[in-house]
Amino acid sequence: MKQYTPLMTAFFYDVSTWTKPLAFNMPYTTIDSSRQLHALLGEKVVQPEKPSGTLHGEMADMAYVFNWDEYYAPRALYALQRKGLRTRVPPAPSICRQVAKNAHFIMGR
């Protein structure tokens, strides 16, 4: 996908879906022909699989963290807020130690 920043016209364009792959960390590619499109098509998704997570260790005294670039991240945030948890956005990039590896988190926007 070629990324354009300046537009050469004064017309308004609805660009709300132009950056969806970048906003939600989705794999993407350009499709130049209908043959390419048909080669990439898979089975129809009837019921999408929701991501699941696990809690390592005991209940946290400090915080739970998750990446914001996943599709269901806003839903997870609102679920936590409905349960009465106070939510915050990190002011700077951070690294958290996990069981097997370190997890990197970008700062909030």
Image (cartoon, helix red, strand yellow):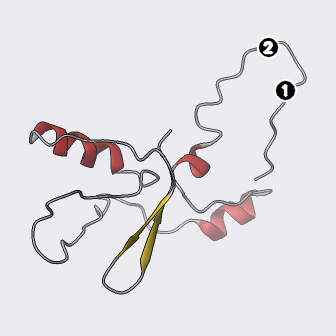
Identity of the amino acid at label 2? Phe
Q: Which quarter of the figure has residue 97? A: bottom left
Kindly give the residue lying farthest to the right in the view shown.
Answer: 8
Residue at the spot of label 2? 11
Q: Which quarter of the figure has residue 12? A: top right
Q: Nearer the viewer, residue 20 or 103?
A: 103
Residue depicted at x 84% and y 12%:
10
Q: Nearer the viewer, residue 54 or 108?
A: 108
Q: Position of residue 54 (x, y in %)?
A: 21, 72
Residue depicted at x 33% and y 43%:
74
The answer for how far apart the CA atoms under marks 1 and 2 are is: 9 Å
Q: Is residue 86 left or right of residue 99?
A: left
**Mark 2: few/some/many CA within 10 Å (<14, 14-19, 20+):** few
Residue depicted at x 71% and y 22%:
13
Residue at the spot of label 1? 7
Circles 1 and 2, Cβ within 8 Å, touching? The answer is yes
Q: What number is the disc on residue 62? A: none
Q: Is residue 96 left or right of residue 27?
A: left
Q: Secondary structure at mark 2?
A: loop
**Mark 1: few/some/many CA within 10 Å (<14, 14-19, 20+):** few
Residue depicted at x 18% and y 45%:
80
Q: Position of residue 106 (x, y in %)?
A: 51, 54
For residue 11, above or below residue 45: above
For residue 105, above or below residue 75: below
| 1 vs 2, front mark | 1
Q: Position of residue 25 (x, y in %)?
A: 54, 57
Kindly give the residue lying farthest to the bottom in the view shown.
Answer: 100
Q: Is residue 59 left or right of residue 98?
A: left
Q: Position of residue 27 (x, y in %)?
A: 59, 63
Q: Secondary structure at mark 1?
A: loop
Identity of the amino acid at label 1? Leu
Q: Is residue 51 left or right of residue 27?
A: left
